[in-house]
Image (cartoon, rainbow, N blue to C red):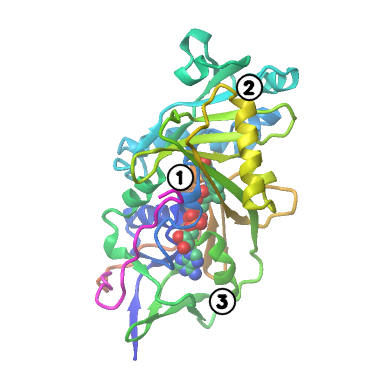
Amino acid sequence: MTLRYSTDIVIFGGGVAGLWLLNRLNNEGYRTILFELNGLGCGQTLASQGIIHGGLKYALSGSLNSASNIIATMPNRWRECLAGNGSVDLRGCHLLSDEYYMWSQSSVRSKLKTFLGSKSLRGRVERVAKESYPDFFGQATVNGVLYKLPDFVIETESLVRTLSQGQEQNIYKLSSDSASFQRDQNGNVNTVVVETENGQLSIDCQRLVFAAGKGNMKLIEEANLKTVKTQLRPLNMIFVKGAKLPAIYVHCIGDSFSLTPKLTVTSHKDAIGQTVWYLGGEIAESGVGKSRDEQLLAARQLISKLFPWLDLSETKWECFAIDRAEPAVNSIYRPDDAFLTEEDGVIVAWPTKLTLAPSLGDMALQQLEDKAIVPSPITDNNDLTEILAHPDFSAAQWN
Ligand SMILES: Cc1cc2nc3c(=O)[nH]c(=O)nc-3n(C[C@H](O)[C@H](O)[C@H](O)COP(=O)(O)OP(=O)(O)OC[C@H]3O[C@@H](n4cnc5c(N)ncnc54)[C@H](O)[C@@H]3O)c2cc1C
């Protein structure tokens, strides 16, 4: 038996992109539902380091372009949302740290790079006086320079829960990893058919949105879209657990001219309240293809070199592979703003960074306005709970 249903917008993907758009579009009066294949947040969102940043890497390269101007406005957009005054209400989302630092060891090259970074950030990067160093850097046994950045770190599990709050009746779990898409006489995809326990559900809508990260690849194929393509950037991320680890949030700029920090550390808590250091940056990129033992050894050596005063006894180390999913723009170019495009009535979106979710929301609303898509008068009740299940929340890798 096939049941029929209609709504304005159907989103695929329950990471930050899909959940952010669900909130923005429903707030603007569009009847919007979201389908998640696995658990909410289970892809890149909960694997991210949660840094809401203003585009330090552009400053480090000395190149400020239009994309860097957009990203520079994002921390304030998030702060408005966190205070309940922004385009999405994030009052339930926890901050892990309101402070983010950059640590540069005293090699000439890295000092220079750090200097260039601070200069092009026009006073937004503040050199920290030695007497004001946080405890951990105050204990340093090597010479280094510490800078404070205008960035902050959010707890991504609470982000996913907050974005889902109040939207429970609009979020459903797909019971199979395939959906089929149907076109109208103009060639626009405006119907999606999903499986339910008792048969099929056919949903007519004004727009479909693919916001499924890596999953966009398969959705694009199933909807037979031709122009938009996905690119994956693999990473080998590391986490370290230890009751004695201090909570630190820092980019360590190395002594090469690479724009990627050698090491990016954020600190989290596991299920039993133990501190977890989550390690990304260049170490995660160069670790692709390494075995678990090789990657953990490389990470341990790097930490010992950067922070020789740190006691690493009684720490437990682990690593895991995760892909960043982005639009394929060209092989050498990394997208620096959120990305949204439309083909045959399907909007395909990648925020490219957690930070850029507010920009993605703006783009989606602009796209609907440009295509004269307006909220339709309510005809159907959005509650599909009797025929579809709701997805669970996923957890961070260390839980
Ligand atoms: C290791 C790492 C660290 C990062 N750190 C940061 C950072 O500190 N700051 C920052 O700004 N950005 C960071 N990013 C980038 C950021 O995490 C991503 O840009 C962002 O989370 C992407 O969100 P998304 O919703 O598009 O995708 P995802 O979070 O990957 O979510 C996609 C969702 O779609 C679901 N799905 C898949 N297929 C289907 C389907 N067919 N139907 C329905 N649902 C489907 C998946 O199960 C998943 O829940 C990091 C990324 C990685 C990988």
Q: Is mark 3 within 8 Å of ligand 1?
A: no
Which residue position is annotated with label 3? 222
Left or right relative to 135: residue 82: left
> Three-letter amino acid code at disc 2?
Ser
> Three-letter amino acid code at disc 1?
Pro
Q: CA distance from mark 2 to mark 1?
A: 31 Å
Residue 357 in the magenta stretch? The answer is: no
Q: Nearer the viewer, residue 41 or 287?
A: 287
Residue 109 placed where, x, y %? 75, 21
Q: What number is the disc on residue 104?
A: 2
Quadrant of residue 65 within the rendered picture: top right
Residue 172 placed where, x, y %? 34, 68
Residue 384 in the magenta stretch? The answer is: yes
Q: CA distance from mark 2 to mark 3?
A: 48 Å
For disc 1, the neighbor class at 10 Å (few under 14, some 14 to 19, many from 20) is many
**Magenta-tinted stretch:** 382-399
Rendered position, 374 above or below 398: below
Quadrant of residue 308 within the rendered picture: top right
Q: Dividing the image into 4 quarters, which one contains the N terminus?
A: bottom left
For disc 2, the neighbor class at 10 Å (few under 14, some 14 to 19, many from 20) is many
Left or right relative to 24: residue 133: right
Q: Nearer the viewer, mark 2 or mark 3?
A: 2
Whether residue 224 can be seen here = yes
Kind of element beneath mark 3: helix
Q: Nearer the viewer, residue 315 or 264?
A: 315
Q: What number is the disc on residue 16?
A: none
Q: Nearer the viewer, residue 179 or 266?
A: 266
Q: Is mark 2 within 8 Å of ligand 1?
A: no
Which residue position is annotated with label 1? 358
Q: Assess whether mark 3 and mark 1 are in contact (beta carbons under 8 angstroms).
A: no
View extreme (front): residue: 313
